[in-house]
Amino acid sequence: MNQTSSTPLDTLISRLRENLGSLAPDSLFERMRPVLDGFFDQFQLVPRREYDAHLEQMAKLEESVRRLEERIAELERQR
């Protein structure tokens, strides 16, 4: 396997291989790949940086909504 892992699954398999070393044969790691791939396909995973960026954007949107709601309430009081 190429040491420069290109996907999170490659990274996981590589780390398992490094940590288990001689405790597990290489064929086990290759048989694990489709099992893990099928398992992770159940989830909509995103990189942590992307998740954090979305959280930050949501916080800004929530603040905008709060200010707009306050403005609407003020306008309604002026009627």
Image (cartoon, rainbow, N blue to C red):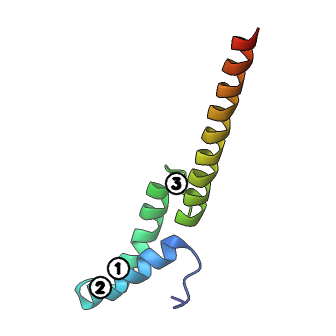
Q: Is residue 68 above or below residue 36?
A: above
What secondary structure is marked by label 1? helix
Q: Are marks 2 and 1 in contact (CB under 8 Å)?
A: yes
Q: What mark, if any, has residue 16 been given in the picture?
A: 1
How crowded pointer 1 is (Cα within 10 Å; few <14, some 14-19, many 20+) is rated as few
Q: Amino acid at mark 2?
A: Asn
**Rendered residue at 29%/89% (across/down):** 21
Helix, strand or loop at mark 2: helix
Which mark is drawn over residue 19?
Answer: 2
Q: Earlier in the sequence, mark 3 or mark 2?
A: 2
CA–CA distance between discs 1 and 3? 19 Å
Q: Which residue is mark 3?
A: 41
Residue 54 is left or right of residue 75, and the answer is: left
Q: Looking at the picture, how far across and down is residue 34, in whole percent? A: 47, 65
Residue type at numbered disc 3 = Asp
Q: CA distance from mark 3 to mark 2?
A: 24 Å
Report the residue that reaches farthest toward the top: 79
Residue lying at 56% horizontally and 74% vertically, measured from the top left: 7
Quarter residue 61 falls in: top right
